[in-house]
Each structure stands twice: as C-alpha cells, then as structure tokens.
Amino acid sequence: MKKIFISVGEISGDNYASELIKLLPDFEWVGITGPKMREAGCKTVENLEDISVVGITEALPKYLKIKKAFKKAVSELDKGVDMLIVVDFPGFNLKLLEEAKKRGIKTVYFIAPQVWAWGKGRIPKIVKNTDILISIWPFEKNIYSDYLGSFRFEYVGHPLLDIVKTETDEKEFKEKLGIEQNKKIFGLLAGSRESEVKTLLPIMLKSTEIMLRKRSDLHFVIPSTPNTQNIVKQLLSDKNLPVSVIIKKDFKNPSYEVMRHSIFSVIASGTATLEASIIGNPFLLVYKVSPITFFIGKMLVSIKYLGLPNIIADREVIKELLQKECNPENIAEYSLRYLEDKQLYEKTKKDLQQVRQKLGEGGALYRTARIIESSI
C-alpha cells in the first residue's frame, strides 16, 4: 500500500484534507492532522491544534512545539513515504517540502500560499520544491506563468463549494438549542484558534450587551471547537446573556449551521468568511492581533482588503473592522445598521451571491483526488 504524508496547520486545511482521505481510501495516510483527518483514518504525527497560530508574536509561545512537530514530520519522511502533500500553512510546509525534495519524495502543494497577497518572493522556493501545485484560484496560473515548464500546475476550483453544507432548517435548529422561535439568531464566530478566541470573543460579547439595549429579539450562538470550548465556557461564566454554544456533538458542522440560520454574524477573518459568503447571509469581518504583527503584516501585504470575499470581488462587499476599529461599539453599530437597513442588507446578499459565482463549480476535491491517484 502506498503511503502519503499530509501536513496541515489550520482547521480549513483539516476540512479539505479529510475529504481527500475519504476519496482515496486505498492509501496509507499519516501526517500533521486535525480532528476531521483523524476521524477519516489518518495516523497522527502531531495535532495541528498544537501548532496553529495567527500572527508573528502570537507564534512565539508555540515555537518549541512547532519545532518539535517539524522534527517529528521529518523523522516520518525518513521512514519512507511515497508522496508528501502539504496544505497552505507556508511557514511550516515550505520547509517540509524542501526536506522531502532532498529525500527524493514526490511533492504536492494543495492550496498554495497566497503569494498574490503576500508578494511573490516565495514563488521560486515553491516551484523548486513542488512537483505538482494544485490551485483553487483561477488567476493563479498567470502568477506562475514564468515557471510552468519546471513543475506541473493544475487548477481544480474551490473545495468549499463541495464542503459547505447544512443539515437543519431554522425551526429544527432552534428547537435543538432550546431557542424561542420568535427570536432572531445572531452568530458569533471568533475563530478556531485559542489565541483568536481569547482576543476576539470578549470584544464580541461586549458588543452583544450594547445590541441588546436596542434589540431584545436577538439570541446569540457561538460555534466552538474541542480546543476552544473551555475558553468559551470560561468567558461566558460571569455573563447573563442570551447565548448558546454548540460543538460538534450537536451538529456535523456547527459553524455552517450557525451561518445558515443567523440573520447576521460577526466572523473572524479567515476561511470562515468565505464559507459564510457561500452560505450567503450578511456578516461583519473582524480582526485583531498584536500591534507588532499587524505592523509587519501591513509592510508585507500587497492587497487592499483583508477579507477573502472583498479580495475576490475587488471591492468592499463586507465591512472590515481591523485592530482599533475592532471594538464593541463599532461591532454593535454596524451590526444594527445591517439589521435595520433592509436595502443595505439585501444588497449585501446579492453581492455575496456574486462572490460565490466567482468561485466556479463544485468537484474540486474529486479532481484533486484523481490528480493524486494518477501521480503517485
């Protein structure tokens, strides 16, 4: 049986990788894994929850864990694998690709780093150490056009179109959570990493207190992951708010259910904003990291917007509240504005439909599986 090492560093990567594993059951899978990959049968060298971070200064406390995970991954490559697949997470995965290349292992980059956002300096290193680059963005082929003779480039479309699905209708969702049917659901999605939740959820919770002074018909719902549920519980312990917390035992994909049934949401910047765009209900994007991380990021980033929906649309489809602007008062003000201005609300829904259309058609994961199967 052929053996594939797969490395992910974020929950979105866990979603994509777990679906690939299900589509390719005749291989032995091992790697840096998330909960869905483990559920799909991938053996674990290290959990992504232990190495996933946002920001530069935020990564420092996890430096030793990341270094240890990398050594474990290289040790596994030395045991012999037939292919290395890496999913985004460039700080870790670019070095792992390099180690695989030294050992003559076939390499695949599925969902390459967003060089169109962070500049093109990484392109030579990606190309040098990647046999097959599988892209989810139609415009990326032009970015790599000068290198196409030295590696294989495949565009497959965006995998979220296959993944983002919900199971319940609004009535059933409310019944399951014990929410009154006349209440309007409002989603609070503070991210999947501990550092994000610790930073953003307290701000979100303060904003709910402001909103409730004007809107008594709102009930807030927080989707939580296994690694953040204790933090969420602790942050809510001294609050008397109409808030429900849901985890995976309640629903297959808690975040998607919240996005689907929320009249509005506040969402941490990242893949979740694109998932919400596919579902189509309006939301605010929020983002807050250390001042040093933000300063360095601004120096490096070469795009106008942070949010993927805005980048795809090349205009502000959703409001972005970054750093100092990400505060309880602003979140409450903009959220209420959307809820009270029907014209703005409906325009945003139409704009999100256009973003979804630009992602192409479904079937990206199936096409990716066939490329891997024929190349190993």
Image (tube, rainbow, N blue to C red):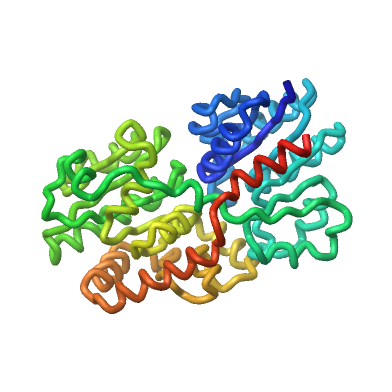
In the figure, is residue 84 to the left or right of 216? right
> Is residue 44 in view from this perspective?
yes
Q: In the rendered view of the protein, which quadrant contains the N terminus?
A: top right
Q: Nearer the viewer, residue 283 or 325?
A: 283
In the figure, is residue 126 to the left or right of 251? right
Taking the spot 65% from the left edge, 27% from the top edge, the residue there is 29
Q: In x, y percent, where is residue 184?
A: 18, 57
Q: In x, y percent, where is residue 67?
A: 67, 34
Q: In x, y percent, where is residue 346?
A: 31, 73
Q: Residue furthest bottom?
A: 343
Classify 131 as above or below 269: above
Q: Nearer the viewer, residue 216 or 38?
A: 38
- The quarter of the picture where residue 340 lies is bottom left
Taking the spot 52% from the left edge, 63% from the top edge, the residue there is 308
> Is residue 288 in view from this perspective?
no
- The quarter of the picture where residue 41 lies is top right
In the figure, is residue 154 to the left or right of 105? left
Classify 237 as above or below 42: below
- The quarter of the picture where residue 321 lies is bottom left
How many numbered marks, from 0 up?
Answer: 0
Taking the spot 38% from the left edge, 50% from the top edge, the residue there is 190
Taking the spot 48% from the left edge, 46% from the top edge, the residue there is 163
Classify 138 as above or below 176: below
Q: In the rendered view of the protein, which quadrant contains the C terminus?
A: top right
Classify 275 as above or below 61: below
In the figure, is residue 279 to the left or right of 6? left
Q: In x, y percent, where is residue 204?
A: 31, 55
